[in-house]
Image (cartoon, rainbow, N blue to C red):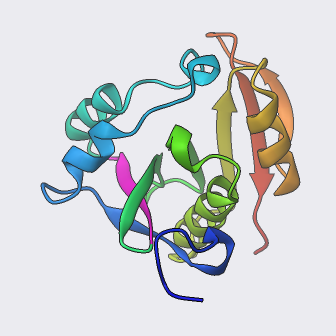
């Protein structure tokens, strides 16, 4: 078997890379499936939000040298809670375990400095794929926020 782009992505690591001019066009070209478009803000809106918010950490989700998704979170130094704001995987890359790998990489990155004790995430309650994904990591639903999005919390080990 060769290392072609058609090789199963389960065997290739996912890395999170800082967003910059080199990967911004690829992030903007990512697409959601039509049924998921109402669940996540556009990457253009998210990148603008990251530019305006000093605490936002924007990451390209990359595998085999290709941008396949986008993730954004905050983990303020003065707080013990991180928040994952956005996660999206391109429609052409769905079903390959990349979302799971991206969440795992994000949790590792978030936990690394050592001051974060819990991670929250919110999602549309109708987004069953997100609900299952986050629950598989141990996120526990806390209820709806003021925007009627589900808040889920993960307690990290000390």
Q: Residue furthest left?
A: 21
Q: Position of residue 50 (x, y in %)?
A: 29, 39
Q: Nearer the viewer, residue 4 or 77?
A: 4
Q: Which secondary structure dominates the residues rendered in magenta?
A: strand
Residue 89 visible at all: no
Nearest the camera: 36 or 3?
3
Residue at image coords 56%, 50%: 93
In the rendered image, residue 60 lying in the magenta stretch gets the answer yes
| Quadrant hosting residue 34 | top right
| Residue 56 at x, y percent in the picture | 36, 45
In the image, residue 144 lies at what x, y percent? 76, 17
Q: Which residues are magenta?
A: 55-63
Q: Is residue 43 magenta?
A: no
Please tell me whether residue 30 is drawn above or below residue 37 in the rendered image.
below
Specify the quadrant of the image occupied by residue 77. Answer: bottom left
What residue lies at 64% left-to-right and 71% top-to-bottom? 8
**Quadrant (top left, top right, bottom left, bottom right) of the C terminus:** bottom right
Numbered circles on residues, count: 0
């Amino acid at each position: 078997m060769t290392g072609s782009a058609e090789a199963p992505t389960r065997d290739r690591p996912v890395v999170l890379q800082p967003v910059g001019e080199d990967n911004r066009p690829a992030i903007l070209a990512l697409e959601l499936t039509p049924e998921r478009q109402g669940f996540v803000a556009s990457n253009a809106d998210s990148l603008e939000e990251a530019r305006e918010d000093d605490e936002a950490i924007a990451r390209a989700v990359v595998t085999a040298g290709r941008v396949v998704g986008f993730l954004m979170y905050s983990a303020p130094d003065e707080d013990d809670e991180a928040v994952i704001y956005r996660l999206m995987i391109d429609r052409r890359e769905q079903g390959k375990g990349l979302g799971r790998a991206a969440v795992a990489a994000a949790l590792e990155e978030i936990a690394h400095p050592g001051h974060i004790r819990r991670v929250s995430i919110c999602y549309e309650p109708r987004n069953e794929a997100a609900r299952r994904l986050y629950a598989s990591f141990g996120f526990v639903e806390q209820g709806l926020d003021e925007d009627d999005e589900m808040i889920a919390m993960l307690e990290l080990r000390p």
